[in-house]
Amino acid sequence: MIEKIKNHTISYDESVENAINKIKKIDPKIKACISTPVVNGKDGMLKGIPFAVKDNMEVVGTRTTCASKILENYVSPYTATAVQKILDKGATLVAKTNMDEFAMGASTEYSAFFTTKNPLDPERVPGGSSGGSAAAVASGMVPFALGSDTGGSIRQPASFCGLVGYKPTYGLVSRYGLVAFASSLDQIGPITQNVRDAALIGEIIFGRDPKDSTTVEKNLSLLKEIENSIKNFKFAVPKEFVRDLNPDVKKIFEESIDRFKKMDVKIEEVSIPSLKYSVAVYYIIAPAEASSNLARYDGIRYGLSVEGKSIDEVYMKTKDEGFGREVKRRIMIGTFTLSATYYDAYFDKAQRTRAKIVDEMNKIFNSYDAIIGPTTPNVAFKIGQLSSPLEYYLQDIYTIPANLAGLPAVSLPMGKIGNMPVGLQIMCKRFEDDKMLRIARNYEKVSQR
Amino acid sequence: MKSVIGLEIHAQLLTETKAFCSCKIDVNARPNTNICPVCTGQPGALPVLNEKVVEFAIRSGLALNCKIHQRSSFDRKNYFYPDLPKGYQITQYFHPIATEGYINLDNGKKVRIRRIHIEEDAGKMIHSTENITESKESLIDFNRCGVPLIEIVTEPDMEAPLEAKEFMEKLRDILRTIDVCSGNMEEGALRCDANVSVIDDNGRSSSRVEVKNINSFRYVQYALEYEIDRISQSLKEGKDVKHETRGWDFVTRTTVSLRSKEEENDYRYFPEPDLPVLEVSNDLIEKIKNTLPELPDQKAERYVKTFGISDYNAKILSRDRLLSTYFESTISAGVDPKDGANWIVNDLLGLFNADSAEFDPKKVPVDTLKILVDYTNSSKISRLSAKEVMSEVYKSGRNPDDIIKERNLIQVSDEKSLIPVIKKVIEGNPAVVDQYRKGKTSVIGFFVGNVMKETKGKADPKAVGELVKKALDGKI
């Protein structure tokens, strides 16, 4: 994409029209899009570039469903800051993409509407929850799409679809207009074909937003920085990430370690003991915040509203009909862990353990430039293959720590098992997104050769 | 029997915009006109703290002798109600901005303030019937949603309904003096929930009962009196006092059960992830401290010390800033402070109280008060006439001199006009003159009264008294 921008080889009409036509042609099979509104941006460097956003980002005048029945007909009254920044650079929105309902899932199977197919193998899931965005990019409908990542929802689908998925440091990108799942973990980021595009979009969407108090201003020149060498860098590979790894994935990961070594990078195995608690901590904190964030869908002001004889009945019927099983499950878990009786045993303990994870990871960054490992324990699974919630939750085992610690993390293609790709994950210290993408870019260059 | 009372007060802050969005605050606006994605809980909207709210909360904390915390944080209080669009209220549960303050009552008792925290108001609901359970239709106005509040929680340091009322009045006076809250309970700008329990003579304590919906200062007293009676009666009869929340019904002047504690919500408090920790610098706290106006108690003390007025008058005059400014202006205009204080407290405020109106300095301007005090002191008009004139000015805003002229209120004090009348009265009552001669000086009053009668009250009693004495002593 960035080459095309630089050479001015695509015109606005052609490219947007192409995208619209491709969506018309391909999407009935892939099912990446929930709606296909066309929203033109202003004039700017991205003029003529089509893009897609996950359907949990507000774009004024478009439906923003979060793949949920409860918001099926909700029309956004305003536009998310990150989306606005891209529109301001001239790009044209052509699709709002499928996802697991309220971003709770790792396959798009929990979408209330339909499951998106992995463009590389339609029998497999594209990953999730930003599966629609990944599938739209992987199938060539759009050169880039925005996703959101709460526990791996950008990186895991990128890994499953052979793409670059970049979750910026928490606080770099405004969450204003991103429908909240777990506010302390959610972050918007791009899914792209290559690292340079990810850096380009990252730079555009960064910045302090007066409408999001958790954002900060950092001057990061990603595009400039990423072309520098990574000679003499030192990486840490947590034992906890490779201990029980699937042998096929392990083999590919070892190959990528070799590639890095050839670039004069020193790689050492380390132990981050608290990492073993990250899934447990995540599945307490994320549902707790979600149970509160999703309380607003009550059938009173907007969205689905089911009539009842009393106000309590309106609430119960609306939520019962409007939310899917997984969303209900997490709301119930969150309501339980926040209840007065269990707060100390669950939520408070999880918060304290989270602080310990943050601490242990930060200590690693005192001696290492990055933590690397596979993005996912395996390649994309088949639709319907994972049946128990626990199996499902373990999908996020490698991606969750970055969200808990607010770190930047990126997944990029590391190799293939058969026809299916698997991703390499790189994590760096908070606000070292430039360094992280620099590592990714260096890896991308050698792996493409 | 002894009662134990603690209060939880919500005060609406007088900021121009809401606590977490930039919507205007205007009680007179048409319903649902001052709203936005943030205060109506649209998906994806985020709160941004209004700095003025922090400043107002700090100002309140300082005025209430609290410790201000340089680090405090926000939390979510989760519950479902249609006037609460997000399904949670943003509040400060774990780490409030201010703690450990107090207000001193007039009886010398210190009522401790446990904490002050910032939170947001909910919307306003109108039901087609009494309450939401029976209502077929309910309307919601979100204009009030997100209006900043401070919640002030006291320790259970009050023992009588009157103490609670006095606490509320003092709190109102302070909040008004520092310009953070209008203090109007009837309009809901200041709201009070009372927690009360009763300890019997054997030291046995009843359960704590919370009384809500108290919407005036008088009702603070009445509601607590009723509730303490009710609980004491139950204790005497050996009946169980339920740990519950009751509502004050000002029509029947009783409290009614709203819900038992078992039915109470579990609010599932947890830290608000959308707002960072609130850090305030020592500089800011000092800056606010330095701009605090003189508070009512300090002012009263100064009035007693510098003007020599009574404690009682000083307390009343220092309560309200409009009133104290008025009082001080009369002194600047040359009125003797004691005179000014008496006139304002006894006469002027009486006029406003009779109308249940708020004090308004424009009704009887400082100049008018000065004229009336001067005229009375120089006996140009009687005290009674002056009061009459003041009342007329209050009602009509007319010029006091015009009223005096029109009503012919100028007192007769010149000897030339008075001596003939006095002589006539003395001559007409030889028996009484005789009593005087025998040493009964109190009969002077009798003669003065008769002179006043003769002059239809226009004579200056002081001048008459002196002349009567002279005449009786044969000096005229």
Image (tube, coloured by chain):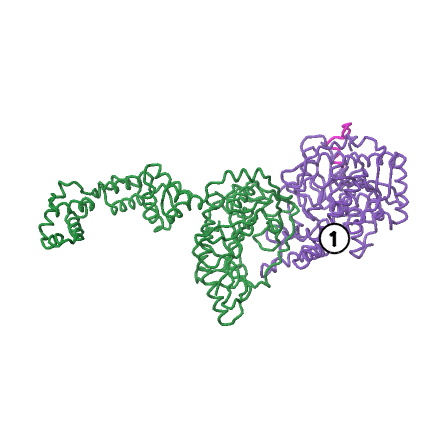
Chain colours: A purple, B green
Q: Name the residue nearer the viewer: A18 or B406.
A: B406
Answer above or below: position of A19 versus B207: above
Quick one: label 1, few (<14), some, or many (20+) residues within 10 Å? some
Q: Nearer the viewer, residue B249 or A446?
A: B249
Q: Please, which chain is the residue tagged with disc 1 on? A: A
| Residue B120 horizontal/vertical position (percent) | 56, 48
Residue B273 vs A334, above or below: the answer is above
Lateral position of residue A64 relative to residue B399, left or right? right
Secondary structure predominantly adopted by residues drawn in magenta: helix
Q: Is residue B268 visible?
A: yes
**Amino acid type of the residue tagged 1 in the rendering:** Tyr
Asked which quadrant contains residue B55, the reply is top right
Check residue B44 for magenta coloring.
no
Asked whether B102 or B77 is in front, the reply is B102
Residue A59 location (% of width, % of height): 66, 41
Return the residue at label 1. A283
Q: Secondary structure at mark 1?
A: helix
Q: Quadrant of residue A24?
A: top right
Position above or below: A379 against A220:
below
Residue B151 place in picture, x, y as percent: 54, 50
Residue A60 at x, y = what percent? Answer: 64, 41
Q: Is residue B18 left or right of residue B415?
A: right
Which contiguous range is marked in magenta? A5-18
Q: Residue at x 43, y 56 (%)?
A: B218
Residue A131 seen from this side: no
